[in-house]
Image: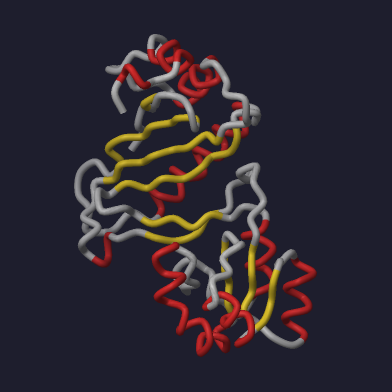
Amino acid sequence: MGKKFRSKKYRESVKKVDGGKRYQSEEALDLLASFPKAKFDETVNVAVKLNIDPRKAEQNLRGAIALPHGTGKQARVIAFCEGELAEQAKEAGAIEVGGAELAKKIEEGWFDFDKAVAHPSQMRHVGKLGKVLGPKGLMPTPKAGTVTEDVVSAVREFSAGKLEFRTDPGGNIHLPLGKRSFDNTKLNDNLQFVLTHLKAIKPVAVKGNYIEKICLSGTMTPGVFVAIEQ
């Protein structure tokens, strides 16, 4: 987007940022907090550039993570399970539960949910939905913790804001850290939790600096680069 299309608030914020500087995380969050606020509670996002090759299966990182202070957003979760398990999943927060009938509802065009979890026994129904759920990033998978025997816990965690992540083709991981209304201490706790988790799953084949860039931004703000501690 060209500069002439940027809002006045955005242009004011850019002036506060030293583009060549890598700020300590607390300093970066303080700077972000000083930017003019939008009329809604913006999401604070982190983008982490990793020194990996996502074309190699062992370096194409993906998984799920529950931030210590959540994200400030409750997700709408559906659960593919039946019988007593379906009742328990409903009590845990699932907005819809079922098997073949739930799969049929989705096939007919219903997508009013943010996350789908499934018991392994239901994959005979879920597997048919790959073409419609896959492109939307909603297809349950064991790697992301959305195909699991413990459907009830998965529903509870994802409803509370547990996040799925995976590297994009450029080796970046994007995650929300919370809302601008969060205390900066909570945002920093969430940020450090993400970075610690990414370091813990560093592929063995990666040599040299693993984390190359860290950038924080609000929904409507410029980015602020964060100093890296390898």
Q: Residue at x 30, y 17 (%)?
A: 19
- Where residue 187 appears, x then y in whole percent? 57, 33
Q: Residue furthest front?
A: 108
User: Where residue 17 appears, x then y in whole percent?
Assistant: 38, 14
Compare residues 107 and 136 and report the one nearer the observer: 107
What residue appears at the point 45 percent right and 30 percent down from the top-left corner?
217
Is 37 left, or right, of 85 in this rendering? left
Q: Nearer the viewer, residue 116 or 4?
A: 4
Residue in the picture at 69% in, 76% down: 97
Q: Position of residue 43 (x, y in %)?
A: 55, 36
- In which quadrant of the rendered image does the N terminus lie? top left
Q: Is residue 96 left or right of residue 185?
A: right
Q: Is residue 94 above or below residue 1?
A: below
7 versus 163 height, above or below: above
Q: Which x, y percent locates residue 93? A: 74, 64
According to the image, what is the colour scheme of the structure? secondary structure
Image-quadrant location for residue 54: bottom left
Q: Quadrant of residue 214?
A: top left
Q: Is residue 108 above or below residue 65?
A: below
Residue at 33% x, 38% y: name it. 230
Looking at the picture, does residue 147 appear above or below residue 188? below
Nearer to me, 194 or 174: 174
Mark count = 0
Direction from residue 118 to residue 7 in the image, left or right = left
